[in-house]
Image (tube, rainbow, N blue to C red):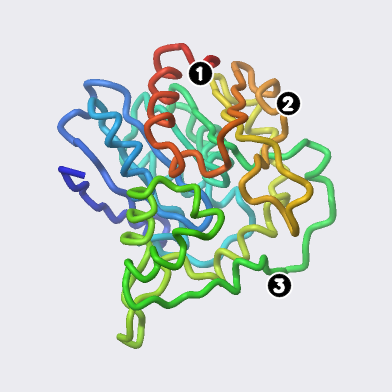
């Protein structure tokens, strides 16, 4: 991007959380866009979406355990929502449009319920929110790990990471520059000084996924919200893809009906990786939602 964002570190309850700010001079001239990434990603995966929204003040957060944020412990996904609410309060966020992807969209719903005065509208991109009955299933074992825990963690460079991922699902559907952004900003120097490691450690990512159904309070948050909410859903999951289709939507189809002011839009030709797959479309859908046209494509 032509103008690099400013990195902020916030000390909240002893937890250091990071966020990137674009166009600080525009704050207050239009609603702030508050962007929340998915599990395993970071705040700079939104760069190409932000490029298509040049008239807005933007803050892209990094969830605990991701990117430049600290923290590797959590009890449930509600903790990510509490972190976001604390960040919004610390930054004195006003009249924001919250945009969340996947687990980040789940956390954003909780944040808007915890700090309702901070948000005017939400756009949820393929949120990991299942049917209410699924939250009454037995919890997974405390040491349960998703296969993501076995991801390769070390690379000689961002280019090596890009070359490894460019032809591999789910990264193979990414816009080329969005994949470069993911790789460039998704690495940190290795502790032993030899090359680079993922900024979201595989062991942490592997703990997040099994807890997807551990936050039974999500529906109390959904029903408490008084703001317009657009739910964007990708194509259905393909049951023939084993062990599971990471590019199909994880969202309960009837979710939008649970919000007081919910609307639904399914993009049958797009995948769960929409913000990185088609940044221009993602930006247009956000802009349409802000203009009150969120239920059409």
Q: Is residue 141 left or right of residue 162?
A: right
Label 2, secondary structure: give it: loop
Q: In the rendered view, tell whether residue 70 sits above or below residue 290.
A: below
Camera-nearest residue between 21 and 92: 21
Residue 225 picture location, percent across and down: 58, 25
Q: In the rendered view, tell whether residue 121 sits above or below residue 203.
A: above
Q: In the rendered view, tell whether residue 258 sits above or below residue 131.
A: above
Pointer 1 local density, CA inside 10 Å: few below 14, some 14–19, many at least 20: few
Which residue lies at the image location 45% right of the left edge and 19% below the top edge? 289
Pointer 3 local density, CA inside 10 Å: few below 14, some 14–19, many at least 20: few
The quarter of the rendered structure image containing the N terminus is top left
Q: Name the residue under label 1.
A: 297
Q: Mark 2 points at which residue?
A: 254
Q: Which tag, 1 or 3, sits closer to the chain's start?
A: 3
Q: Which mark lies nearer to you, 3 or 2?
A: 2
**Which numbered disc covers residue 4?**
none
Residue 153 picture location, percent across and down: 47, 75
Camera-nearest residue between 244 and 211: 244
Most extreme residue toward the top, as rendered? 292
Q: Which mark lies nearer to you, 1 or 2?
A: 1
- Give the quadrant of residue 31: top left
Label 3, secondary structure: give it: loop
Q: Mark 3 points at which residue?
A: 143
- Give the quadrant of residue 169: bottom right
Real-space CA distance between mark 1 and mark 2, rounded to the nearest whole angstrom: 19 Å
Q: Which tag, 1 or 2, sits closer to the chain's start?
A: 2
Which residue lies at the image location 78% right of the left edge and 50% below the top edge? 240
Real-space CA distance between mark 3 and mark 2, rounded to the nearest whole angstrom: 32 Å
Camera-nearest residue between 266 and 89: 266
Q: Which mark lies nearer to you, 1 or 3?
A: 1
Label 1, secondary structure: give it: loop
């Amino acid at each position: 991007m032509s103008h690099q964002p400013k990195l902020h570190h916030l000390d909240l309850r002893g937890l250091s959380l990071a966020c990137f700010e674009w166009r600080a001079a525009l704050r207050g001239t239009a609603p702030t866009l508050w962007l929340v990434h998915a599990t395993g990603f970071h705040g700079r995966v939104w760069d190409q979406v932000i490029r298509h929204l040049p008239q807005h003040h933007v803050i892209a957060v990094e969830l605990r355990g991701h990117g430049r944020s600290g923290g590797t412990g959590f009890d449930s996904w509600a903790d990510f929502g509490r972190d976001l609410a604390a960040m919004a309060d610390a930054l004195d966020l006003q009249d924001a449009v919250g945009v969340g992807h996947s687990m980040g969209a789940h956390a954003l719903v909780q944040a808007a319920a915890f700090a309702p005065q901070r948000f005017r509208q939400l756009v949820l991109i393929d949120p990991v929110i299942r049917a209410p009955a699924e939250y009454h299933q037995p919890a997974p074992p405390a040491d349960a790990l998703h296969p993501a825990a076995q991801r390769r963690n070390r690379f000689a460079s961002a280019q090596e990471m890009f070359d490894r991922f460019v032809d591999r699902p789910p990264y193979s559907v990414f816009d080329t520059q969005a994949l470069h952004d993911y790789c460039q900003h998704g690495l940190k120097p290795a502790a032993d000084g030899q090359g680079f490691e993922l900024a979201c450690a595989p062991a942490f990512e592997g703990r997040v996924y099994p807890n997807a159904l551990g936050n039974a309070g999500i529906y109390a948050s959904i029903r408490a919200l008084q703001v317009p909410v657009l739910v964007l859903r990708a194509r259905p999951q393909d049951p023939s893809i084993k062990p599971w289709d990471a590019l199909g939507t994880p969202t309960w189809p009837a979710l939008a009906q649970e919000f007081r002011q919910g609307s639904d839009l399914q993009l049958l030709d797009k995948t769960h990786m929409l913000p990185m797959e088609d940044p221009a479309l993602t930006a247009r859908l956000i802009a349409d939602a802000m203009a009150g046209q969120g239920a059409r494509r």
